[in-house]
Image: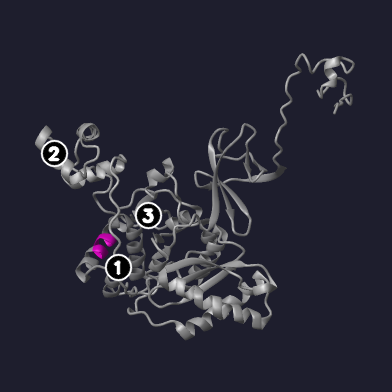
Amino acid sequence: MSPWLWYLTSGQRRPGMGQDRLWMSAKERRRMIVMQQVETEGTTLVEAAARMGVSYRQAKRIWKRWQADGDGGLVHRLRGQASSRRLDESFKAEVLELYRRHFFDFGPTLASEKLAERHGVRVVAETLRRWLHAAHLFIPRRAARVRRKRRKRRERFGSLVQLDGSHHEWFESRAGSGCAMVMVDDATGVTLAHIGAEETTADAYAVLRQWIVRYGLPEALYTDKKSVFSARREPTEEEKRQGSGALTDFGRACWRLGIEIIEANSPQAKGRVERKNGVLQDRLVKELRLRGIDEIAAANAMLPAFCEELNDRFARPAASPIDAHRHAPGAETLNDMLCREESRVVQNDWTVRLDKRLYQIAKQPGMPQPGQRVVLRQRLDKTLAILYRDQALEFTKIGLYETRKVIPPLGAEQARPPQHPAAHRGHFYCGQEGDISTVA
């Protein structure tokens, strides 16, 4: 499913647009960018059709709608409307109840047949399959293992970029091991790398930022299912509303940038980056040894030039001359996207807490009330921003959060004086200030 983006149209309104916020899919967002390039950069409709993956006649229709209705003309006109063929919810509940009672171990096709035969309830097998999946009533059998086939390279540079972390002793015995975050373009083999201590979100951000600044925004990333890229949990209510599914911090950043994340089911599926890891574990280790580098910072300083030499030697031209990358956003936008984001509740004293540190929200117009939620964004440079309804708030850091110690009320035994026999059983005596003692 394509990610959904909201686009602020203030300052960029065109005729026919009456709202300040326009919801667009990633596909529609890309079409908007292509239309802007046609208008301002002299891109022809033939080139635009190739970039959008449509025919020339369809590109002319899109261009005509964009001229007439602006950015809103690119949005599908049926969005937000219920299907006229949608079945009633009460009918769906009846079907699922019959399935639970009589056909709980049936497949969707057979259950559909028996529902019509025995109960006179007719529902298409594929519709029933979707309902059963959503209600967790049907688990499909694992398909038989098939022989893998060679997958052709993507035709355009930036159409698909493989991303993986490679744990290795990059500095041999001179220093500890590390993890290289490696990006390899599927069409050309162009490579970019960044070394960190572990495979963390910050290091994944670092290599992605380098790629975006250097080449632009790729259409899709091909990753594994590690926790940096994939969230194995139920989506939150906000994630359900926006239709993104459960997201990690890295996934959220890619979703907002319009970069699709494709999860590989096996290491062989992303073989290009796996093989590139082997090349780096051979050539990069030797290069670091020859240069006497034994620190991560020094290694990252030489990696851009090293990867450039690697690309000159091993990269190949793409099958298509069209670059699939989109224009990179500004540095400030990237800082706000590639960050750690947390939601916090404002306390009664207008403070919020993050990593045991307290932050005081200053008095200002439009400030949140106690009990409302704000968003805290911690950027890669360790700067922090607090936002309420997409507006930045003024705040000050007021120190570390201290856990309050709860002192239990004085019981009958605790209140006894030291000379009482029960005081010699290892109890604490709470009397005058400074008169506290224990007995071993």
Separation of residues labelled 1 and 3 (CA atoms): 32 Å
Residue located 35% across and 63% down the image: 30
Separation of residues labelled 3 and 2 (CA atoms): 38 Å
Counting residues from the N terminus, which is met first, the one under dot 1 or under dot 3?
Answer: 3
Amino acid marked by disc 1 = Arg
Q: Position of residue 403 (x, y in %)?
A: 70, 36
**268 w.r.t. 131: above or below:** below
Residue located 36% across and 79% down the image: 318
Q: Which residues are magenta?
A: 62-67
The tag on residue 147 is 1
165 lies left or right of 188: right
The tag on residue 235 is none
- Foreground disc of the pair 3, 2: 2
Majority secondary structure of the magenta segment? helix
Quarter of the view holding residue 408: top right
Quarter of the view holding residue 339: bottom right
User: Is 409 included in the stretch rendered in magenta?
Assistant: no
Quadrant, the C terminus: top right
The tag on residue 3 is 3
Counting residues from the N terminus, which is met first, the one under dot 2 or under dot 1?
Answer: 2
Quarter of the view holding residue 364: top right
Q: Position of residue 41 (x, y in %)?
A: 37, 73
